[in-house]
Amino acid sequence: MRVFCLAVIITVLPLANGLADDAGRHLQADLQTLKNVGNEGRGNPKATQCWQRVATASAHALPEILTALDDANPLAANWIRLAVDAIASQANSLPLDSLTAFLADTKHNPRARRLAWELIDSREPRLAEELLAGMIDDPSLELRHDAVARLIDAATQEKKGGSAAATTSLKKALSAARNVDQIKTITASLKKLGESIDLQEQFGFITDWQLIGPFDNTDETGFDRVFPPEQGIDLSTRYPGKNGDVTWRQFLSADPYGMMDLNKAFPGPGDGLKEVTAFAATTFFAEKSRPAEVRLGCKNAWKVWHNGKLLFGRDEYHRGMRIDQYTMPVVLTAGENTLLVKLCQDGQTKDWTKQWQFQLRVCDATGGAILSENRPPTPGPEQAAATHGKEPPL
């Protein structure tokens, strides 16, 4: 009898391993079919059959399925997320250890990692809370948002026992927050606790610029036209502008979120100039060479250069604006770095088209501020106002 049982084990184990290998290959093939789904229904009939098989896979396959989201297009991602939901809803248990390991790997797609956290939270809320506490600086904005919200809630409770602990939690939350609504909530709470917050310095907004303009942008031709500042920055030189010679002059902003309002720098009739182009230049000193990101918010057409190299640009007007709207990776040079921003305003006259402005900061990949070694103190309202509408020297 013992010999017979051993024979069965020897026979069955290779068979089981083979079936597992086959199942893994079939799952990968089905996932690839789902990732091939395209617009206008391309690939959908076959994808439907594959989805049904994926949606009935073992819960232990969830990390593998979530990995497929790393390079999935938006349509394919919807199919895969629905399959994950179907598997989780039918499973008696989930592979929490594997999901936790998946969540910890920041190389995975942020949405996939958030989905892994939600699966953990659905079965083990305490574990999910513990994990979230360590994600205050997570590259996933969704997970970071939840971690910051957790700190804000903790500070609300800590206020009942005194302000010291609440202040510590709120300052930690502020350093990690990227959502404007959260930033405003935290700042308001800190002010109530008697804390003065310098948001410009906190987030590294650059608000000391040299401006020149206006140049022409009639019929929106200014975006592609090459103006003298694009060929080299010489702050002592004057150039022919749209309405006469123009020169560089300093412009400061006291706005907490680093808003540079060019309508104040170049005041025109009514609500501001139209069909114009301007440039903003600044020098950023880095302690050492390092990877960084230039992050811009702007609702006008724009281009940005770093050390004379064009980083990116968008020939689009009035599509909305937010902090960190555009992210451009750079490698800062040890010592002096020049940043040049080109800003075009079109000829539309509706109320929502009159803003001509931008905000820019330098940070690391997580959004943490990198401050220039020569960063001047944050300007006060009176100091900033003194540079607004000031006639340039000619």
Image (tube, rainbow, N blue to C red):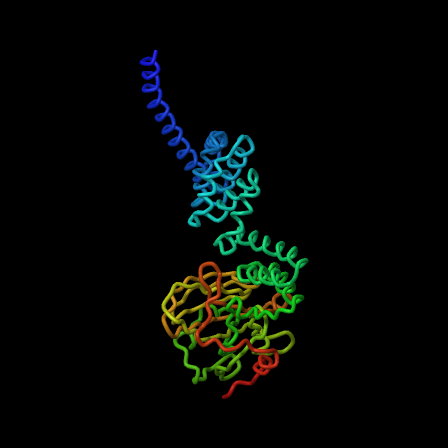
User: Is 222 left or right of 165, judged from the image as shown?
Assistant: left
The answer to whether one can see residue 357 in this image is no
- Counting labels gives 0
Q: Nearer the viewer, residue 388 or 218?
A: 388
Q: Residue furthest bottom?
A: 394
Q: Which residue is found at the position 56% from the left and 47% from the top?
A: 129
User: Is 78 left or right of 185, judged from the image as shown?
Assistant: left
Q: Quadrant of residue 236?
A: bottom left
Q: Which residue is found at the position 42% from the left and 49% from the top?
A: 107
Residue 328, above or below 28: below
Q: Position of residue 211 (x, y in %)?
A: 50, 78
Q: Which residue is found at the position 42% from the left and 69% from the top?
A: 305
Residue 92, above or below 129: above
Which quarter shows the N terminus? top left
Q: Nearer the viewer, residue 308 or 336?
A: 336
Q: Position of residue 389 (x, y in %)?
A: 58, 81
Q: Position of residue 392 (x, y in %)?
A: 52, 85
The answer to whether one can see residue 324 in this image is yes
Q: Residue furthest top?
A: 1
Q: Position of residue 275 (x, y in %)?
A: 55, 72
Q: Nearer the viewer, residue 190 or 293?
A: 190
